[in-house]
Image (spheres, rainbow, N blue to C red):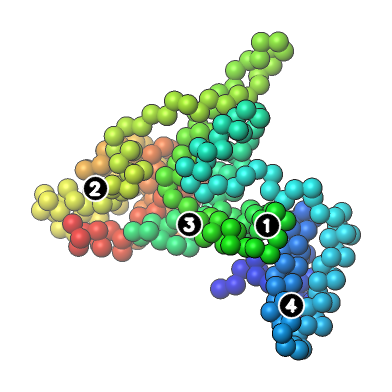
Amino acid sequence: MKNRKTYIPITLAELTNVTQSFSTSLEQIEYLAVTILGLQKKLKQNKTNENDDNELILEMIKFAENEIKNLGGRPVTWLKYPLVTNVHDYNELKGRLKDDGKLLEWVKFLYNNIERSDQEHDGILGWRFNDRVLRQAELDSTEKDGDDDEGFSQLLWEALDLSDDFVDHLKRQLETASFPVHKSTSEAVPINRFENETFDSSEKETISGKHKPHTAYVALEKKDGTKRGDAWSKLKRLASESKGEKQIELSGFGKIYLKRDREKPEDLIRYKHTKFEKPDDGYLINKGAFNRSWDKA
């Protein structure tokens, strides 16, 4: 299904409608600027042969450029902070951002612009950066690298499939930030303390990909002779008991928070290493993934 926020419109009316669907002028400017890039690429493709679309494309580009001017013009920079997609690249830039006093805000920027993706890994939905940040990244890349979009293509590929390891790492950075009192002003001034990261053994194994809660649980239950249907029912009971608020002991894995999905309570279970904060918080385990893990165990 086409995402109305990202794909290039084919008519002027469609361009107008999609632009107006954004709530802020800056979002409208970003969308119009990305649309111009897409239309220019299409125009370039049509350059070798006369195409009936060319006149319409030029009209849409002119409309978009005028709209950007009317909305206040392009910002000085598109991306407020560098966009990274893995722990290694994060650590490469961490020192510079820390020296500039922008580390905490950078981490907030990265973490707050991550959302669930449509892709599954072992039955669990993955993570990705949202469309707005991807638009900003494309515009930023174009201004820096011109028509050479190889770098952005690689970034886009990675930004649409973020690892649990990276997302968890960012979350821990926020959780370990401290806000002491500044000596000279007696005011609370945020500083960054991201050095001491500790994990228990079960969390380390999960982050490194050695096992996820349901695969560890499946391995032990199957070894003990439990039937697959009974094991799934037991997992649902534990999720009902935990409700995302009570930490429970999961066989083969350790302490964890579970709860049943509100829309599909029979087929989806959510888990987190900390208490749930939102209705759709946490990672998903679906019944299909559970069954596949059972068959492999």
Position of 172 compared to 57: left or right? left
Give the residue pinned by disc 2. Answer: 216
Position of 58 compared to 42: left or right? right
Give the residue pinned by disc 3. Answer: 161
Label 3: which secondary element: loop
Do the residues bearing badges 4 and 3 touch, measured as CB atoms within 8 Å? Answer: no
Which one is nearer the viewer's eye here, 118 or 247? 118
Q: What residue type is labelled 2?
A: Ala
Q: Give the quadrant of the C terminus.
A: bottom left
Numbered tag placed on residue 78 in the rendering: none
Which one is nearer the viewer's eye here, 106 or 279? 106
Which image quadrant for residue 12? bottom right
Sequence-first tag of 2 and 1: 1
Residue at the image position 69 percent from the left and 79 percent from the top? 45
Circle 2 residues within 10 Å: few <14, some 14–19, many ≥20: some
Label 2: which secondary element: helix
How far apart in space, not on screen, are marks 3 and 1 (Cα)? 23 Å
How far from the left and from the top, in percent, is residue 216?
Answer: 24, 48
Give the residue pinned by disc 1. Answer: 145
Residue 70 lies, with reference to residue 173, above or below; the image says below
Q: Which amino acid does label 3 sit on?
A: Asp
Which image quadrant for residue 46? bottom right
Residue 106 visible (yes or no): yes
Give the residue pinned by disc 4. Answer: 43
Residue at the image position 32 percent from the left and 32 percent from the top? 200
Q: What residue type is labelled 4?
A: Leu
How far from the left and from the top, in percent, is residue 135?
Answer: 66, 58
Tag in front: 1 or 4: 1
Which image quadrant for residue 107? top right
